Structure formats: structure tokens, C-alpha cells
Image: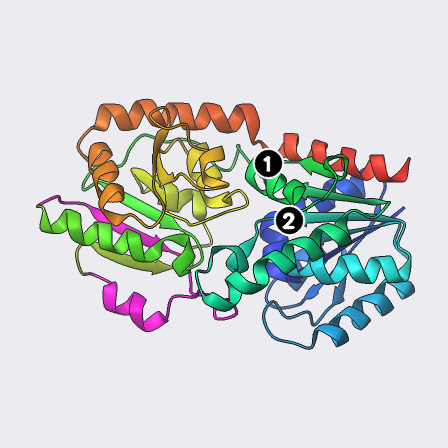
Amino acid sequence: MKLLFVVTEDWYFVSHRLPLAVAAREAGFDVVVATRVGEHGETIRAAGIRLIPLGLSRRRGNPFQEIVTLVRLYRRERPDIVHHVALKAVLYGALAARVAGVPGRVNAVTGLGWLFTSAKGITRIIRPAVRLTLAWLLKARGSLTIVQNPDDRDLLIRSHLPEHRLRLIRGAGVDTAAFYPVPEPTGTVCIMLAARMLWDKGVGEFVEAARLLTQAGVHARFILVGDPDPGNPASVPEASLRAWHEKNGVEWWGRRDNMPAAFHSAHIACLPSYREGLPKSLLEAAACGLPIVTTDAPGCREIVRDGDNGFLVPVRDAQTLAVALQGLIDNPVLRAEMGLRSREIVLAQFSREQIIAETLAVYRELTQ
């Protein structure tokens, strides 16, 4: 059985899907990944996965040409299952797979992205059409769609995607051996936001909350971990990140390859995102035993039980975010209690082994 992954970026595949691909290979699949090859191609090859360079742009590009490219790829490779990852690969790939006659299609909607979080007029106009088109593409026989949270599932059902075509699998899973708790570091309380530097991750609200708390006399460090994403319309300019650095307690660290060590230097994790599929950074922070402050938004509220392992705040509300953060900054006992619950929740619901087993079951369902 041949399993072909289609994803726009190799770094995303390595971060979110490589362990699944290795598990599928060990389960007997001939695994191939088609992606734009950047710095992570050798990592994929070293894992024993055949790699096909694919010029599928996340933002720009000719849609017709890219769909034709996928049709040709599918006809040449003749996969038994193609696994599309993220919204653009799902939209283009689902159509191409139908044209090429791929018998099994897995469409992983990892979040509904900028199109569903932007308040710009043009996105509000085209959003309903995209929802209906997506549902039409995904309801074909031989197609199963994976969503990461109940909100995305319900949105697709309201868009007329039959419920029996949907599978709820919560994220990519966490390596709970690599991400583990350690005692709190000494010194100034550190609040960490780890994500791509995008406005819709709540980066602006995080920085504003830091300003409000600093002006109120609260002494804390507010760490941004991650790089801008120029391929995303919501990317924060690097100039803004540099301007914020070392003002009001804000520090921009850029990307960190050793994320367990980064979380071990923090006291609190924060992600004031507008909408997520299921944020991997919060799952990793929770596995490290951190209390979490995030938004009452799709994806985020799947990880945090308000008042149990953290706090939920409204989207785009820096004032309430600051209040919630101060409640943890000032209370080390509460941080410790909530951090323990974070770890328990991840072990019970979000381990990598659980998620891989659930996804392999989807593959088996399509090949029976």
C-alpha cells in the first residue's frame, strides 16, 4: 500500500507529521512525501521516507497550474491513499485526487487559517464560498476528513459536509518523553508565547498586555519565541519585533530548535490566538507542566480548562489577558497546581502514541 503525504512546507511536515509517517512505514505502508524542500529535506530522507520536491506555494501561485501539477503527481505515483495536510493542500489536493482517481483521500484540516480569522472585507466576502466548496470536495466517496477540534467539525457540518465523513483527532500528538516537567526556574517570572510571529496568534495583544502590566508595576519577562512567516498575510514585520525587544519586559528570542529547554526556562505559557486547529506549542508547554493563559477560541479551549490548568480570556482583549497573567505571576502555588493538571491532561488525551494510533485507524478504514 502506498501512502502519499502532500504538505506545502518540509519544516511543517517534520514538526507535525514525520513521526506519523515513520509509524505508517513500520505498519507496512510505502510512504512518500511531496513538499517544498527547504532545510529539512535530509531529515525526511534520513527517516527512510522518499521525498518528492513540490512547488506548492502557501500564498501565491497559479491555482490551475498547481492543481494540474498535483493531478500529474497522483497519476504518476498511483497512491492508495493521499494524505493532504493543511487548508491549501486540502482544497487543491482533494480536487486533484478526484480527477486522478485516487481511491483513498485523507484531508487533514489543521485549522481554518487566515481566511477564517481575518476581519478584512474581501475575506469575509469569499469565506462562505470557500466553506461550501470545501464541503463539496470533501464529501466524495473514499474521502475522510480529519479535524482537530469540535468547532471546525461543527462548521463543516453546517457547510453540508456529512458527519460520517469526519473524524475528530486532536492534533499531531506530543512526545511526552521529550517534553517533561522540571522544577520552576528561579528568578523573574517568565511568560512565554511560542508560535510563528503572526498577528492572529495574538502577538499584538501579548505585547500590549506586557505594556499594561509593566506600567502597573508588575515585574516579569514576556518572551516571544518564533520567527515571522513572510508567506502568511498576517505575519508580524521583523521591524516591529525588533522595536518591541527589551521594552516593557518583552524579549524576542526568534526560533528555538530546543523547545523543551525553552519551556523549562518559563513559568507560564501564553497564546492569545484568534483561532487554531490545535496549537502544538500549547500542548508541548502543557506536557512540560506549565500553566496556560490562552483565548476562549476554537482549538485553544480544547487544551485549557478554565480555572483548572490555566485561564481562558476573550479574543483580542489585552486588558483581560493582563489580568489573567497577573493572577499567575503573583501566585506560585496556583502555578504549580495548574501545571500539574496541564501534564495530566496531555498524558490522558494528547500523547503522540494515541494520535498516531487514531490516524492509522483512518488509513485502515479507507483500505478495507
Q: Nearer the viewer, residue 49 or 189?
A: 189
Q: Is residue 222 magenta?
A: yes
Q: Mark 1 against mark 2, which lies toward the viewer?
A: 2
* Residues at discs 1 and 2 in contact (Cβ within 8 Å): no
Q: Is residue 4 above or below residue 359?
A: below
**Residue 99 appears at what percent x and percent y?**
87, 62
Look at mark 2 in the image and give the residue it sits on.
109
Q: Nearer the viewer, residue 43 or 61?
A: 61
Residue flagged by tag 2: what amino acid is it?
Val
**Which of the 4 image quadrants contains residue 238?**
bottom left
Q: Is residue 80 magenta?
A: no
Quadrant, the C terminus: top right
Q: Is residue 64 above or below residue 361?
A: below
**Which of the 4 image quadrants contains residue 225?**
bottom left
Q: Which mark is residue 155?
A: none
**Residue 85 visible in the picture:** no
Q: Is residue 282 left or right of residue 220?
A: right
Residue flagged by tag 1: what amino acid is it?
Arg
Q: Residues within 10 Å of mark 2 (few under 14, many from 20)?
A: many
Q: Is residue 188 left or right of residue 235?
A: left
Tell me which segment is drawn in magenta. 217-246
**Residue 30 appears at what percent x and percent y?**
85, 49
